[in-house]
Amino acid sequence: MTLGPPIAQGRTAEIYAWGEGRVLKLYRPEFPPVLAEREALLGAALQAAGLPVPALGERVEVAGRQGLVFERVDGPDLLDALARRPWLAWRYARQLADLHLAVHAVRGMPGLPRQRERLRFTLGAAPALPPAVREAALRALDTLPDGDQLCHGDLHPKNVLLCGRRAVIIDWLDATAGHPLCDLARTTCILQGLAASALVSRAQGVVVRWFDRWFRARYLRRMPKERERLVIWVQVNAAARLREGIPAFQSWLLAEAGKLLAGQPGLGRQDRETT
């Protein structure tokens, strides 16, 4: 089949239309074939667990590149929906929180890397992270609990597609077994970093911040005693995200991670009160 132009692109792969009602996720040449194999196995396990994911088709090879065929889900992602209808931010925030809860209800999925080990590696490989902050992040990580829940690793609004009343979670490449608050903190880092960046207007930044607060408030109703611990998880994740080298987020990530040195509270007083 001849490929047309990609309909979407990410760090690891390009997405192409693939016949009627399907898409091809074609991995970039620099990534090893094992990624496609791992995602295929994980996709089958996620379907078996009843999670809202695109139906998985066959594995293919195109021009020496590995690819996976998925059900095509037509609709905006959650961030686009938020930009179009910001007055529904509270509803979208609840939806994202409920998706996190559904994912974290799954335990003992075999073959997943350990979240804590991945965090340790990422902290050690972040060149923009000052050594003193790196050591503080590693010490803080040692104080945080481990877990065996399924964690998406990147469950932010761009990785949720809306199709009518259906919400579908995509891009499971960073899935691990670990503690759900780490997953929650990763999403908060992405949202708060976006709100503080020049990628959105000031008004959009306000909407994203409130979206994040409502999202965490909804989730933490199940874990009300974990609010202060979440602050530490956010700081550790901010330190780890510096490995990604995203210029628009660097200032916020450095400032949040730096709070580990003095044991400063994160997220702001109003933010903690809201959650």
Image: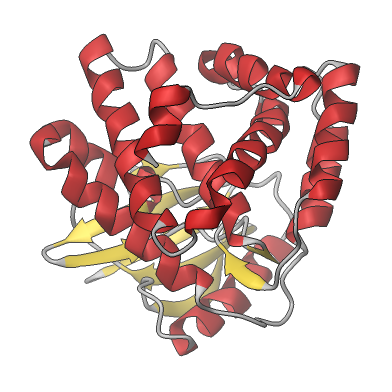
Which residue: 68% across, 61% down?
35
Q: How many marks?
A: 0
Q: Nearer the viewer, residue 231 or 56?
A: 231
Residue 113: % across, % down: 76, 65
Which quarter of the image is occupied by the C terminus?
A: top left
| Image quadrant where one finds the N terminus | bottom left
Q: Is residue 134 left or right of residue 109?
A: right
Image height check: is 231 above or below 170? above
Q: Is residue 74 left or right of residue 2?
A: left
Residue at point 63% right, 14% down?
255
Q: Residue at x 23, y 70 (%)?
A: 21
Q: Nearer the viewer, residue 239 or 72?
A: 239
| Left or right position of 54 against 235 | left
Which quadrant of the figure has residue 233?
top right
Q: Nearer the viewer, residue 110 or 69?
A: 110
Q: Is residue 184 above or below residue 270?
A: below
Query: Residue 72 is drawn in which quadrant?
Result: bottom left
Picture layout, residue 92 above or below residue 249 = below
Q: Residue at 54% across / 55% down in the picture?
A: 225
Residue 13 shows up from this direction: yes
Give x and y (percent) for residue 182.
62, 51
Residue 248 placement, left or right of 262? left
Q: Position of residue 84 (x, y in %)?
A: 12, 34
Q: How is the image coloured?
A: secondary structure
Q: Position of residue 18 (x, y in %)?
A: 33, 65
Q: Is residue 17 visible?
A: no
Farthest bottom residue in view: 48
